[in-house]
Amino acid sequence: MTLRRLCSSFLAFCFFCFVAAEAMAGATVAGTVKLELPGGKKPGRKKLQMAADPVCAGKHTGAPALSEVVVVDDDGALHNVFVHVKMGLEGKKFDVPTEPVVLDQNGCIYKPHVFGVRAGQPIRILNNDGTLHNIHPKPKINTEFNQAMPKFRKQMTKTFDKAEVMIPVKCDVHPWMQAYIGVMDHPFFNVTGDGGTFALKDLPAGTYTIEAWHERLGSQTRQVTVKDGESAAVDFTFQIPGKKKKP
């Protein structure tokens, strides 16, 4: 074998190893979050009373606006659960996205109701309602702010500098408006929606504590160990307060 052919074969082998390593890199933890339904009946959603502000009420002349505190599919799949790696990434650093996360005030409701953002990542807050809003996060670690958004102020940008799970957000003008922000120092978080599913992708190999947080139902943790290229299933089941089974 000539030296040129030997070098070409070696480079091809190195490229194959690199591609294989890329394919194997990154583990996934995925699963579902459900609510136990006594008698198979899911809890109803409360109708939001918006008559105090005609602008808000006028945006819901068709279907009424409903509370997002407990949103459940017919099979018990639970929405608006913030799932994240709570422990296992200590000492690791990850680039912070510069693309802002958007929090919209639309129909006098915060959209999304629950979301995650990286510490230091901008949050673009929109006002699409043509009425006065007042955005007021209540953090315990980060700096609190209380910012009016008159109808002519369509957007503003804010950031939180420290990791904190979770930060409640309210509107002092419209008491039914509520949202929650998970501020993270890593990118491994997700919020459940239809089907109650979540996925934490591209995790480094390791052992992790996964937390599922819900504003009304509390939080649960599970421990899982994953290897490069591996997928692991982690599921959570919450119970309605007062309905817990006796040990």
Image (tube, rainbow, N blue to C red):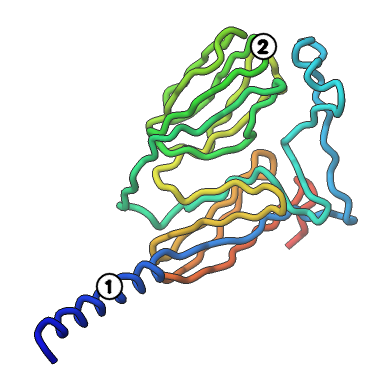
Secondary structure state at the residue bearing disc 2: loop
Number of residues whose C-alpha sits closer than 10 Å to that of mark 2, classed few (under 14), some (14–19) or many (20 or more): some
Question: How far across and how far down the image is residue 244, in percent?
Answer: 76, 54
Q: Quadrant of residue 181?
A: top right
Q: Which residue is mark 2?
A: 130
Q: Residue at x 64, y 31 (%)?
A: 111
From the image, which quarter does the C terminus lie in?
A: bottom right
Q: Residue at x 66, y 11 (%)?
A: 130
Q: Residue at x 50, y 33 (%)?
A: 101
Q: Which residue is mark 1?
A: 15
Residue farthest toward the left in the current orientation of the protein: 3
| Amino acid type at mark 1 | Phe
Q: Is residue 80 left or right of residue 76?
A: left
Residue farthest toward the bottom in the current orientation of the protein: 1
The numbered mark, 2 or 1, whose residue comes first in the sequence reads 1
| Amino acid type at mark 2 | Gly
Camera-side mark, 2 or 1 = 1
Decide: is 79 above or below 75.
above
Decide: is 87 above or below 112.
below
Contact between marks 2 and 1 (CB within 8 A): the answer is no
